[in-house]
Amino acid sequence: MQIDPCKAVSKRVAKSDCDINTINNLCYGVCYSYGNVYGEDVKRACEQKCRAMISRKKQELGTNDCYKRQPSPPPQWFQVPDYFPELLSRTGDAKVAKAMCIQQCKGGRLEGECIAKCTLNADAVIAGPTKGPDQGSTKGSRKESYSTTQPPATPGCQKSSSCTMWITIAIFLAVAMIAHLLFIRQ
């Protein structure tokens, strides 16, 4: 089994006109959910996919990482219950875990948001053999069958190594000019 937060987020926002921050929050939310159950390695691999997705979305909007800052990962909030990843690790079946997750959400606090989170996290699962965080481990080491391949490189600042240098020079010159004007007036 693999986790693809981009697939889940794309499905969720397909029929709406979401801004880049909403996509950012949804994508990283999936990563936090799975990272809390399956560990930091899974979370980091998931976050790499989110960064690549956000960068691609910005290019679709006609800009890139040099001209529009990539949103930072949002804080992790715990108001909405997050049942799906734990249920998936116990059952090993995404469909069963989703049904159980929705059942646990019913009648609870923030029922609508909880069910939406179950659906989003379930949509991120790419079918295949499932191993929970403790299954398949030997002597305390964790084995996980998640994909940790690097996302494809995105064009933009990565191709232009001088992007950061020019931004730094521009900021320095602006500060120097302001300081110079302040000292001349005194």
Image: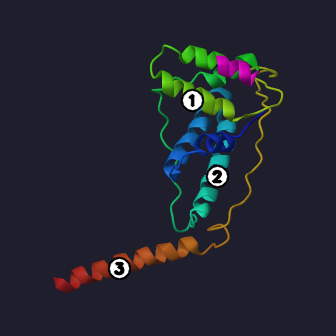
Q: Residues within 10 Å of mark 3 (few under 14, many from 20)?
A: few
Which mark identifies residue 53?
2
Which amino acid lies under the numbered mark 3 shown in the image of this protein? Ala
- Pick whichever of labels 3 and 1 is earlier in the sequence: 1
Which mark identifies residue 117?
1
Residue 128 sits in quarter? top right
Which mark identifies residue 176?
3
Is residue 99 in view from this perspective?
A: yes
Residue 97 highlighted magenta (yes or no): yes
Label 2 – label 3 distance at C-alpha: 37 Å
- Pick whichever of labels 2 and 3 is earlier in the sequence: 2
Residue 4 sits in quarter? top right
Please tell me whether mark 2 or mark 3 is closer to you in this view. 2
Is residue 133 in view from this perspective?
A: no
Q: Residue at x 56, y 37 (%)?
A: 29
User: Mark 3 falls on what kind of element?
Assistant: helix
Q: Nearer the viewer, residue 179 or 151?
A: 151
Which amino acid lies under the numbered mark 2 shown in the image of this protein? Met
Q: Nearer the viewer, residue 11 or 139?
A: 11
User: Mark 1 falls on what kind of element?
Assistant: helix
User: Mark 2 falls on what kind of element?
Assistant: helix
Residue 103 sits in quarter? top right
* Secondary structure that dominates the magenta span: helix
Please tell me whether mark 3 or mark 1 is closer to you in this view. 1
Q: Is residue 152 left or right of residue 13?
A: right
Residue 93 percent across, percent down from the top left: 76, 21
Residue 174 highlighted magenta (yes or no): no
Q: Residue furthest left?
A: 186
Q: Residue furthest bottom?
A: 184
User: Looking at the image, is 111 positioned above or below residue 54?
Assistant: above
User: Which residues are drawn in magenta?
Assistant: 93-99
